[in-house]
Image: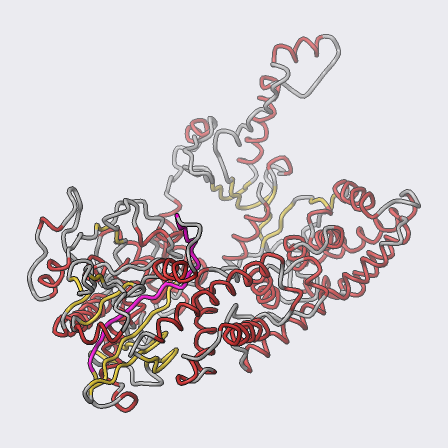
């Protein structure tokens, strides 16, 4: 009998129950606390040991405090010596700025840390003296420090009288055990050996409670049932393997060999044949325990999902009781409805009747999830989308792209607001934030008129100072900087220094000058808004850099997005609604930037600027510094879409070499159309309008309840791209092929967004889904 499962089920239905079993002392929370305390101090305060200790509920923290502390420690991988020092890392992860709320949270976490570590440190010191008596006193001192007797009394007071009696037995038995260990164990025993002996001794002590009242359900094993002892009996698990019990599996001796040994006066455990009469008696005793009503239940499947057979005694039972009634237990529950709100959620997800609980708030998210799973499988919309997305503040460019990749993933993140638990690691996203931080502050400290004469030495000093400021602001604890972190920042420093050299050379040859860094759309300039009401689309976000060119009373604006990886402009992705964010930002700057940049604003394009330090291979070992520099610049060649205006393009690089821009020239220095990523001003405007239409269309589908599992598959990779790094993959567990992205050439794309349909010749052979719809 699984006592934990039985207790949880009866508790869920608010039915008082008493388990007529005897449990080992070692399974109770008190002993779990002691064993975990030994493991924690002996294991160097490892994460798993520490939280096994805290989750006993007796270590001095509440459940909510333990959960909050665990989230912090899991995120920052806190263990070992880090527990002995005040925590200083931000509760919200890298690059988060300390606010009043986050500072208060950090103080709370440190208060809990001190409350946890102080008793353990004293326990470690006391038991370090060795000897059975000293260690027993150390254990008892830890329990007194944690006020465990009072906690056990408080817990017992909330239980049934029988459980209260049992918990009092636990404390008395544990104290007696410590006394016995002090008297009987080796006086010079080590803490490791003491803990081992304590586990063995606790496993030999069996505790049980006498039922204190008859007004409850008595749950007992079949061997402990007395015949005709209750008015109503439920015989559970009336399946083959329980009635009769499966014979013990012995790989050493067969039943025939056992019989031969028994004939030689060497009896072992009973054979299957010898155990059969006893099994029949136990079944008879259980079935005759009731004087008025008898219920016999049997599952169709095991907990592992395998089919199970009913007991071989069932035909005999039905023959003896011809007027018995056989019903499906699930049907009874569905008809009668749940007994509690918690059970209502379970029944809801399994198809139960919960109409009497329809107004309960705890059912709404479960109802939404159930309906979404059903709708996703049938490719139908959910009905309560408007209520589910209420208050989300409209669709943004980022969330719109998430919807374009997979509508079910969007539903999980923005509808159900599911958030995965992650460790705070200095990954690609944090690296990008670090680079943005350094570049923004560098140009803020170096005025435009000083950039051209800036020496390499001075630039290096400024960059090194900014990097140290970043470490001080976001990694204040020097001891948290492991060897790996120190190497990482050393490498990032080289990348930033190398890129800054290239960037300063580029700016010296450009008539475009940086106007803004980290420009926030929605704060520094007005947000771009499409539509109104709950279905409005609000374009907000940060633009890494805005460059401008003053020409004939007009200002041409170019926006840059720094990328630590590879980013190429893909017309196929743009058509699907992916990668439109920068073009929406460009539209926002043109629409809302007049007060900041001038009245006559025109688009110069969008540029993705790689910030990397790639290895350069040159055949000529005697290459000059200028040749090495040009080779490095070629490695960081930008991608994007620029305005097809030769004067504007040449203003971006007065040298005419275009080493870092997506522009190709012929041998005479003329700009070639082939290989150059340019387009007309009309088409740039058309693209901005198309981006707005895509977001409007997405907002309409979201409002109508679209939650289909439809990950977008690249025409390059066979596996769905949207699933590759999706945090919601454990929720949907999708294993299908996904939608296939059409492969669009440039002119096909412009025709498509201008109103023409995508032709079949633009799609890879065998691809599914020839257009975005």
Q: Residue 700 colored magenta?
A: no
**Quadrant position of residue 705:** bottom left
Residue 540 location, quadrant: bottom left
**Residue 50 position within the rendered picture, expressed as x and y whole percent measured from the top left:** 67, 57
Q: Looking at this rendering, what residue extends furthest in the left direction?
A: 756
Q: Nearer the viewer, residue 457 or 134?
A: 457
Image quadrant where one finds the N terminus: top right
Residue 770, image x and y in percent? 14, 52
Left/right placement of residue 490 relative to residue 608 reads right
Q: Is residue 215 left or right of residue 126?
A: left
Q: Residue furthest front?
A: 622
Residue 375 in the figure: left or right of residue 634: left
Q: Nearer the viewer, residue 198 or 600?
A: 600
Q: Quadrant of the C terminus?
A: bottom left
Eyeballing the image, is 228 above or below 551?
above
Q: Nearer the viewer, residue 648 or 416?
A: 648
Residue 565 visible? The answer is yes
Give the percent coordinates (x, y) of residue 372: 30, 58
Number of numbered discs visible in the structure rendering: 0
Identify which residue is drawn at 52% across, 72% down. Answer: 460
Residue 225: image quadrant is: top right
Magenta extent: 602-619
Above or below 457: residue 33: above
Residue displayed at 59% across by 70% down: 475
- At which x and y percent is residue 289? 57, 39
Instruction: Tell me which colouring the rendered structure shows.
Output: secondary structure
Residue found 42% across the figure and 31% down from its top: 318
- Report if residue 357 is visible in the image: no
Q: Nearer the viewer, residue 721 or 511?
A: 511
């Amino acid at each position: 009998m699984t006592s934990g499962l039985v207790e949880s089920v009866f508790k869920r239905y608010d039915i008082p129950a008493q388990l007529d079993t005897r449990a080992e002392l070692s399974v109770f929370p008190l002993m779990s606390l002691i064993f975990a305390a030994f493991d924690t101090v002996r294991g160097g305060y490892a994460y798993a040991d520490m939280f096994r200790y805290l989750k006993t509920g007796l270590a001095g923290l509440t459940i909510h405090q333990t959960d909050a502390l665990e989230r912090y420690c899991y995120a920052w991988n806190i263990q070992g010596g880090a527990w002995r020092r005040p925590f200083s890392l931000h509760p919200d992860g890298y690059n988060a700025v300390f606010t009043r709320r986050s500072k208060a949270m950090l103080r709370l976490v440190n208060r809990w840390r001190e409350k946890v570590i102080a008793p353990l440190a004293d326990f470690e010191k006391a038991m370090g003296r060795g000897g059975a008596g000293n260690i027993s006193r150390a254990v008892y001192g830890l329990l007194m420090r944690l006020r465990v007797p009072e906690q056990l009394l408080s817990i017992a007071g909330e239980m049934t009288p029988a459980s209260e009696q049992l918990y009092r037995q636990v404390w008395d038995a544990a104290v007696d055990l410590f006394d016995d260990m002090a008297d009987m164990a080796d006086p010079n025993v080590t803490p490791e050996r003491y803990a081992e002996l304590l586990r063995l001794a606790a496993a030999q002590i069996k505790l049980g409670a006498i039922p204190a009242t008859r007004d409850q359900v008595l749950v007992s094993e079949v061997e402990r049932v007395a015949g005709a002892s209750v008015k109503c009996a439920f015989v559970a698990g009336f399946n083959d393997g329980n009635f009769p019990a499966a014979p013990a599996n012995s790989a050493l001796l067969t039943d025939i060999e056992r019989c031969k040994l028994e004939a030689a006066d060497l009896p072992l455990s009973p054979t299957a044949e010898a155990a059969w009469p006893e099994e029949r008696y136990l079944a008879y005793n259980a079935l005759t325990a009731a004087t008025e009503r008898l219920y016999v239940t049997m599952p169709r499947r095991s907990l592992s999902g395998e089919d199970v057979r009913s007991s071989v005694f069932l035909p005999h039972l039905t023959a003896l009781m011809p007027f018995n009634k056989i019903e499906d237990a699930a049907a009874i529950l569905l008809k009668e409805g749940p007994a509690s709100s918690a059970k209502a959620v379970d029944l809801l997800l399994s198809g139960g009747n919960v109409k009497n609980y329809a107004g309960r708030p705890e059912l709404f998210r479960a109802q939404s999830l159930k309906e979404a799973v059903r709708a996703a499988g049938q490719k139908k919309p959910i009905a309560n989308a408007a209520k589910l997305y209420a208050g989300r503040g409209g669709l943004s460019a980022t969330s719109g792209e998430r919807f374009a990749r997979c509508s079910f993933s969007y539903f999980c993140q923005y509808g159900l607001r599911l958030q995965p638990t992650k460790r705070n690691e200095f990954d690609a996203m944090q690296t990008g934030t670090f680079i943005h931080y350094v570049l923004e502050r560098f140009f803020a400290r170096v005025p435009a008129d000083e950039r051209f004469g800036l020496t390499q030495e001075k630039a290096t000093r400024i960059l090194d100072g900014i990097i140290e400021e970043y470490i001080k602001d976001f990694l204040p604890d020097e001891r948290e900087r492991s060897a790996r972190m120190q190497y990482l920042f050393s490498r990032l420093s080289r990348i930033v220094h190398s890129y800054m050299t290239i960037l300063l050379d580029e700016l010296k040859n450009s008539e475009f000058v940086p106007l803004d860094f980290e420009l926030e759309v929605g704060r520094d300039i007005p947000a771009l808004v499409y539509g109104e009401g709950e279905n409005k689309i609000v374009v907000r976000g940060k633009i890494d850099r805005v460059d401008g060119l003053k020409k004939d009373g007009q200002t041409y604006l170019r926006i840059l997005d720094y990328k630590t990886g590879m980013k190429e402009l893909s017309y196929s992705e743009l058509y699907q609604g992916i990668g439109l964010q920068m073009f929406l930002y460009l539209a926002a700057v043109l629409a809302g930037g007049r007060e900041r940049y001038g009245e006559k604003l025109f688009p110069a394009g969008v540029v993705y600027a790689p910030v990397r330090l790639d290895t350069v291979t040159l055949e000529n070992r005697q290459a000059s510094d200028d040749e090495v520099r040009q080779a490095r610049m070629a490695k960081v060649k930008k991608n994007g879409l620029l305005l097809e205006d030769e004067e504007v393009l040449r203003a971006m690089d007065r040298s005419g070499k275009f080493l870092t821009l997506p522009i190709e020239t012929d041998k005479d220095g003329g700009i070639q159309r082939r290989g150059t990523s340019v387009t007309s001003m009309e088409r740039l405007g058309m693209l901005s309008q198309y981006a707005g239409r895509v977001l409007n269309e997405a907002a309409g589908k979201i409002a109508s309840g679209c939650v289909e599992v439809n990950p977008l598959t690249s025409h390059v990779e066979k596996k769905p791209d949207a699933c590759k790094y999706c945090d919601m993959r454990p929720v949907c567990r999708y294993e299908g092929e996904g939608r296939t992205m059409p492969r669009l050439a440039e002119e096909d794309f412009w025709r498509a967004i201008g109103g023409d349909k995508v032709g079949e010749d633009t799609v890879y052979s065998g691809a599914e889904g020839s257009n975005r719809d």
